[in-house]
Image (cartoon, grey):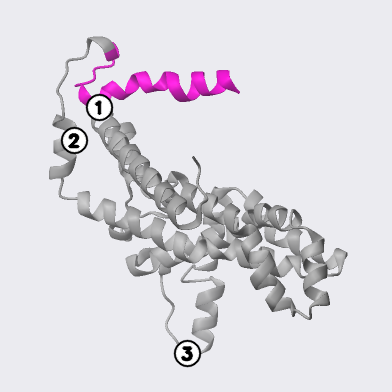
């Protein structure tokens, strides 16, 4: 484990200096000339910076607001199921989407939302409405992305909360039942406080990725028509760094993203420590 972090996490930090150099692959990192903060200034002067940061923040914040509570709710509901077979069936059904490839997920989204043969547009046509090309309209992109993310990953996230619920002493519930507590009261005063430390830790970790949005799914869902709502930092870095081979500029943007995420992580961790006494450190 230590070797893994040294080789794949710490050693690559040597390449961070590319962000401060005019990197030339023929000269290598060490011999490329220094340019200071030139690439950062170029990014801040870019006409697309506001659009990119806005889209990245909105997708992350909205995913956090709408997606973070779902695994908690699912775990609390599943924990109340008494029939073991039905409980396992539900768990299997909601876990399954997590194991579907992102490429397949995006293909399913495109198929379901197709203006010609998609299920959604078929229903709209059946009630007398005109079909909508959802994937081409920027105003629908964020909703489609967030809903698909919740469907794909919420079930998997319930595993952690179910494990936390399983660690709660049954004696607490037995005592509550003897005292006449209802199921809702037991959930409110026993289950929720029992998983609160776990929820806080996961919230801190999620907050630390405020500018770090997954690349693959956004890129596959992106097209020229919805780019105003789908261009995020990760896709922009790919285009300038890989497609345009502007490695120094892409590294500067990536470093900016990492620094902001670190600041947010430390800030949220400190706030959580004061408010709930739970934190990463």
Q: Considering depth in this image, is 265 or 89 the residue closer to the camera?
A: 265
User: Gap between marks 3 and 1, in whole Å?
Assistant: 55 Å
Is tag 3's residue or tag 2's residue first in the polypeptide sequence? 2
- For the point 60% across and 48% down, which residue is it? 101
- Marker disc for residue 40: 2
Tag 1 residue: 19
Say few, some or many: other residues with alpha carbon within 10 Å of mark 1 (under 14 / 14 to 19 / 20 or more): many
Q: Position of residue 145 (x, y in %)?
A: 46, 60
State the SS at label 1: helix
Q: Is residue 250 magenta?
A: no
Percent from the top left, x then y, of residue 104? 58, 52
Q: Is residue 28 magenta?
A: yes
Of callouts 3 and 1, the N-terminal one:
1
Q: Position of residue 30 (x, y in %)?
A: 27, 11
Residue 20 vs 194, above or below: the answer is above
Taking the image as drawn, is residue 209 in sight?
Answer: no
1 and 2 marks in contact (CB < 8 Å): yes
Work out whether 24 lies above or below 150: above
């Amino acid at each position: 484990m230590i070797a893994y972090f040294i080789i794949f996490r710490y050693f690559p930090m040597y390449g961070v200096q590319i962000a401060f150099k005019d990197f030339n692959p023929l000269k290598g990192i060490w011999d490329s000339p220094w340019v200071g903060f030139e690439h950062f200034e170029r990014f801040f002067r870019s006409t697309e910076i506001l659009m990119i940061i806005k889209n990245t923040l909105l997708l992350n914040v909205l995913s956090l607001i709408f997606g973070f509570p779902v695994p908690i709710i699912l775990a609390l509901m599943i924990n109340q199921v008494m029939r073991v077979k039905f409980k396992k069936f539900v768990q299997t059904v909601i876990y399954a989407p997590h194991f579907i490839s992102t490429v397949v997920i995006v293909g399913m989204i495109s198929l379901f939302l197709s203006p010609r043969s998609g299920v959604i547009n078929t229903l709209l046509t059946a009630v007398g409405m005109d079909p909508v090309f959802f994937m081409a309209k920027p105003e629908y992109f964020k909703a489609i992305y967030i809903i698909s993310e919740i469907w794909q990953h919420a079930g998997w996230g319930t595993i952690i909360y179910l494990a936390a619920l399983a660690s709660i002493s049954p004696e607490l519930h037995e005592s509550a039942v003897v005292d006449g507590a209802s199921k809702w009261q037991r959930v409110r005063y026993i289950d929720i406080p029992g998983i609160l430390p776990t929820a806080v830790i996961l919230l801190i970790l999620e907050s630390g990725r405020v500018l770090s949005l997954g690349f693959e799914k956004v890129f596959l869902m992106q097209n020229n028509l919805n780019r105003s709502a789908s261009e995020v930092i990760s896709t922009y870095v790919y285009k300038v760094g890989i497609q345009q081979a502007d490695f120094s500029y892409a590294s500067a943007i990536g470093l900016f993203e990492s620094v902001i995420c670190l600041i947010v992580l430390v800030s949220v961790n400190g706030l959580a420590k004061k408010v709930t006494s739970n934190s990463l450190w």
